[in-house]
Amino acid sequence: MTWTLTHDPAAFRAGAGAFVTDHPAENTVLLTVLDRFAKDGPHAYGPDDPLLGWWRPAPDGPVEGVFLRTPPYPLRLGRMPVPAAAELARTLHARGVPVRGVGGIRETAEAFAAAWVAADGGVTVTVAVDERLHRLAVLVPPSPAPSGLVRPAGADDREQLVAWHEAFTAEIAGGRATDHAAAVDHRLADGTLHLWEDGGLPVSFAGVSPVIAGMARIGPVYTPPALRGRGYASGLVAAGSAHALREGASEVLLYTDLANRTSNAIYHRLGYRRVGDLVVLDFTAR
């Protein structure tokens, strides 16, 4: 089993790009990050060099696994067999690559974490995020439709959107450190944030990613607690999904908090179906 590592996104695309685009659901985050690299360069997420890699079961075999690391974010696993995830942990540990956590399909993330702990017994593993990935089968608009309408977010919405991004992260990820203002500015510039308005006031927001290799992803989706239960998120996700389909997406994906039965049920009614369960695991020195 062989892992090839690189700091160069162009080299990664040459070595494993076809595998990434052939499996857009399992590699959805990697597709988004690679698109950002192509637009803004390899330091789009911070000053440190990214680390990317692909795995072959034999030196001359096909690519069957991919990952990337963009500090300070946890390592992200794409599609790969479980043994490849364990081998990746051993490879990175042997090379002295610092890893603060790992995210991906549950089985592979847990295999990586187990191998990392076996190599470094001074690490404690905790679950930071527990999610479910869904794929849109057939879009079913909410009925009855919620009051209000969707519109693109604009510069005047920036302050509200930054506050809502902070609230969303605190709710689903325990306040993981993120530059929310920079994220909002980037998405406003790309035109990928949408708002639901009711009575002329914004009441919910959602992101709709650009279509990349036929894939678009909805998220984050957030409604303030006091405004929940009125169907705003359903209307917004349905509108965002329809927008992605009009833009040419053949795969429309979204993540939900696995513990939130309400949101999982809502998206199921809209036509989303489970792809797999994912975790983000934090590594902490004992």
Image (cartoon, helix red, strand yellow):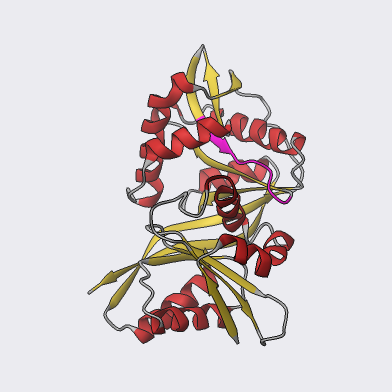
x 45%, y 84%: residue: 90
In the depicted view, which residue is nearer to us: 7 or 148? 7
Report whether 174 appears left or right of 85: left
Residue 51 shows up from this direction: yes
Q: Position of residue 151 (x, y in %)?
A: 59, 22
Q: Is residue 198 above or below residue 102?
A: above
- Quadrant position of residue 105: bottom right
Q: Does 131 appear in magenta?
A: no
Residue 266: image quadrant is top right
From which residue to which does the magenta span run? 205-213
5 w.r.t. 210: above or below: below
- Residue drawn at x 41%, y 38% is 182
Where is residue 181 shown, x and y percent of the image? 38, 35
Q: Residue at x 30, y 73 (%)?
A: 124
Q: Is residue 209 magenta?
A: yes
Q: Residue 222, can we see it?
A: no
Residue 31 location, x and y as percent?
62, 55
Between 125 and 102, the residue placed more toward the observer is 102
Residue at 46 percent of width and 30 percent of height: 228
Give the answer, above or below, for where 224 lies relative to 68: above
